[in-house]
Every structure is written in structure tokens, then in C-alpha cells.
Image (cartoon, helix red, strand yellow):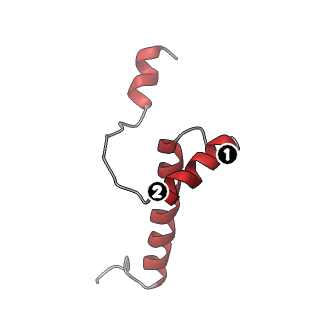
Amino acid sequence: MTDVENKKKKKKMVNITINLPEIYDENIQKLIGMKIVASRSEAIRTALRDFLHNEYNNLKLLGFFDKGT
């Protein structure tokens, strides 16, 4: 696979700015130090992905995505 093909397959990322409580950043830094995550961005992406996945499943259980509603 060529570099051009690889670039086409990558998901586009967007930059956002967020404000977090210091304790969140301190804990993210601990996770980085423990080599559980590679960066702040990875930690936040993982947390957001897990949150969205859980919320989707919760809404699905409640029938939010049923046809006809």
C-alpha cells in the first residue's frame, strides 16, 4: 500500500480546545508516566470514545433508535 493510499484511509482529525480541572490533567499525566496512554490527546480520545459508546448503548436499550420513533 502506498503512502497516498494510507493517507486516504486515515480518519481526519479536528483540533478542539477544552478546559479541564487540574486534577484531570494531573491524572492524565500519571497515566502517561505509567505508559498506559501515550499522550493527553490519546487519553481524551479514549475517554470520549468510551463515553459515546456507552451512551449509544444506553440510548439503544431505551429504544431511542427504534424505527418509527
Q: Earlier in the sequence, mark 1 or mark 2?
A: 2
List x then y, in percent, for residue 36. 67, 45
Specify the label residue 12 is tagged with. none
Between residues 45 and 8, which one lies in front from this camera angle? 45
Q: Amino acid at mark 1?
A: Ile
Does dot 2 land on a helix, a strand or a loop?
Answer: helix
Does dot 1 land on a helix, a strand or a loop?
Answer: loop
Q: Are marks 1 and 2 in contact (CB under 8 Å)?
A: no
Residue shown at 51% from the left, 69% from the top? 54
Q: Which residue is mark 2?
A: 22
Classify residue 39 by image quadrant.
top right
Q: Amino acid at mark 2?
A: Glu
List x then y, in percent, for residue 62. 44, 85
Residue shown at 64% from the left, 48% from the top? 31
Q: CA distance from mark 1 to mark 2?
A: 19 Å
- Whether 7 is drawn above or below 24: the answer is above
Between residues 69 and 47, which one lies in front from this camera angle? 47
Between residues 42 and 4, which one lies in front from this camera angle? 42
Q: Which of the two marks, 1 or 2, is nearer to us in this view?
A: 2
Tell me if 66 is positioned left or right of 54 in this view: left
